[in-house]
Image (cartoon, grey):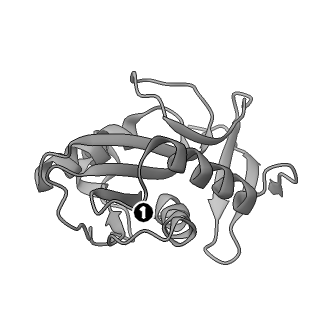
Amino acid sequence: MATTQSNLQPTALISDMANAIRNQVDTNSNDVIIVGIHTGGAWVAQTLHQELKLNTELGLLDISFYRDDFTQKGLHPEVKSSELPEVEGKTIILVDDVVMSGRTIRAAMNELFDYGRPQKILLACLIDVGQRDLPIQPDIIGSQIELQAKQRVKLSGPDPLQLHLMNIEEKRS
């Protein structure tokens, strides 16, 4: 069963993230592109894009075919298309809702480089829960939380955006 974390308000966290982005890049530049990872990261990216009033097109990534567990899990039933503006030489703000192991971000960067070579990639996430399998760290964080072994955090939306803390059941064989 999911419970909403009252102290984790996505709208307020996204505003904090927008301020952090303004401190790191020139948001008036046509060389700054926000790219959201489907699905939750795309929702956060859309909100950030609106709040920052960027002149550039919003990019969206579906990393389904780039995941390192694709052969084990198969194709997600709701594959979406990736839609990216020109990334060559641009500063990319790569956005995800929850960063945990780092594997989703690795897959997203692999896909980005298939579209071109960005000048720089900044990683922005709404929630950082640590627990990395790969040495990938966000540059911009809405909030950092610690989870118990059987807990996960999930963003639902897009309207309204809400964070839920969930307990997962052990798989029985």
Q: Is residue 13 left or right of residue 30?
A: right
Q: Residue at x 56, y 25 (%)?
A: 131
Q: Residue at x 56, y 37 (%)?
A: 173
Q: Residue at x 22, y 68 (%)?
A: 85
The answer to which image quadrant residue 18 occupies is bottom right
153 shown above or below 162: above
The residue most toward the bottom is 159
- Image x and y of residue 38, in percent: 42, 63
Check the picture and name the quadrant holding the N terminus: bottom right
Q: Is residue 114 left or right of residue 144?
A: left
Q: Which residue is disc 1 drawn over? A: 38
- Image x and y of residue 165, in percent: 76, 48
The answer to which image quadrant residue 144 occupies is top right
134 shown above or below 72: above
Q: Secondary structure at mark 1?
A: loop
Q: Nearer the viewer, residue 61 or 59?
A: 59
Q: Residue at x 32, y 50 (%)?
A: 92
The residue most toward the right is 6
- Image x and y of residue 73, in percent: 35, 49
- Image x and y of residue 118, in percent: 20, 46
Mark 1 neighbour density, 10 Å: few (under 14) some (14–19) many (20 or more): many
Q: How many marks can you see? A: 1
Q: Is residue 85 left or right of residue 108?
A: left
